[in-house]
Image (spheres, rainbow, N blue to C red):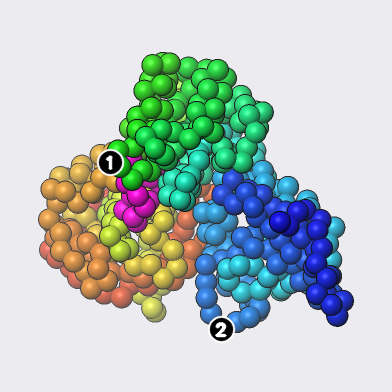
Amino acid sequence: VVKGEDTLDLGGGHQLRFITTPTPKWPDGLMTYDPQTQILFTDKFFGAHVCGDQVADEGWSVYSEDRRFYYDCIHAAQAKQVLSTLEKISELTVKFYGSGHGPMVRYGKMELTSLYRKWSQEQNTRDLNVALLYASAYGNTATVAQAIARGITKAGVAVESINCEAATSNEIKEVAEKCDGFIIGSPTLGGHAPTQIQTALGILLNTVSKDKLAGVFGSFGWSGEAIDFLASRLKDAGYKFGFEPIRVKFKPDDVMIQTCKETGIDFAQALIKSQKRRAPKPSGGASGGDRTAQAVGRVVGSLCVMSAKRGDVTSAMLASWVSQATFNPPGVTVAVAKDRALESLTHTGDTFVLNILAEEKKDLQKHFLKPFAPGEDRFVGVETKEANNGCPILTDALAYLECKVANRMECGDHWLVYAVVENGQLLNDGVTAVHFRKTGSRY
């Protein structure tokens, strides 16, 4: 068993040094440092889910989007542990990061290290925080937890993940005392919740006030008694739920993972709305900010429905922050809010259809304006056909454009998506619907 600060002499000056990097997802995380080559093998840190011919990261900026996406998916919910790890390795002289995913990090090492610190500090300074507690027998409950956490962080709320199998009672209590809401998940083992989850539940019941929002999830192989046990105990104690208990049989598929992400988004948005209701109302006349918002609101755009599909996962959203961006190749930009479910389907290389709505088709506008439950099919009751890129086309739209994402830029609370138009067609000769607003502070 390797312990922190252990070494292993391989000969030839290669005396490997081991550095423990425990996280909720990987309690046994381990980095390995070779002083002879000054290579730090970073395991799950500083990675990217890309696989090319390059050994190192020449032209490292091309991986920027992939590295940010990797961090958001893997590390955003364990920012506290990331900062602790960065502190541990700060004393080392490192030429390369040898990550378990993606090319070796050499040319962009300083920049990526700085970004990991910046991203983690941003997570730790957010106004609202959700405690996400779980145990996992075969990894399935942990996968669900990670998907929920991804949705919460997308919506601008911090998550502190706790793997109850590796955490002490004091650590759980510390997180519970400062949370604005909590979610607890469990596998079902022999018809029961594991002892660690039962202990964590007791701490939550004794620590978290009853006005905090709660949630329950879990995976199981037979009947899922642990999920029912958690939900009934919290309900009897008087907690309100941010969503119906999530029950996953065996391994979650792509559709369920997307549903869990959307559930996390809704949970976070409910906390944000609750915070706004409690905030004091400003008094007096219109401020300079109000006047600026009114002026920005006079910027108008075509009303469109953006539809996308990846595998079995489909999504759609109403969009009006749309503009033609280039003549050659023909391209458009669409601003997509970070907390939109469809955002995860708009990365570089993804495809979508931009359905341009007609002014007279108010029913389509109303359909996509309504709120959708997590995992709900956005296209029920709407006539569609399949585009060449596999995404849904609204047959009652004025026109449609088949697009492929070429680039994205992070812009505050939105991603600005630039896409090349690969195909398109005018479906009728109506008038384009335009979205008029009175303020630029909301849609």
Is 256 magenta? The answer is yes
> Which of the 4 image quarters holds residue 44?
bottom right
Magenta stretch, residue numbers? 247-266
Whether residue 289 is visible to the viewer of this picture, yes or no, is no
Helix or strand or loop: what does disc 2 sit on? loop
Q: Residue 53: which disc? A: 2
Q: Main secondary structure of the magenta part?
A: helix
Q: Can the viewer see residue 163 in this picture?
A: yes
Please name the amino acid that badge 1 sits on: Phe
Q: Residue furthest front?
A: 190
Front label number (2 vs 1)? 2
Type of amino acid at the residue the image marks with label 2: Asp
Pinpoint residue 126: horizontal percent, then vertical percent: 60, 37
Task: Specify few, some or many for label 1: CA neighbours under 10 Å numbering under 14, 14-19, or 20 or more.
Answer: few
Please identify the quadrant where the N terminus is shown. bottom right
Q: Is residue 280 left or right of residue 252?
A: right
Residue 202 part of the magenta-drawn span: no
Q: At 41% from the left edge and 21% from the top edge, which residue is drawn?
A: 233
Q: Which residue extends farthest bottom?
A: 53
The residue beneath circle 1 is 372
Q: Is residue 53 left or right of residue 303?
A: right
Residue at 31% over, 53% down: 255
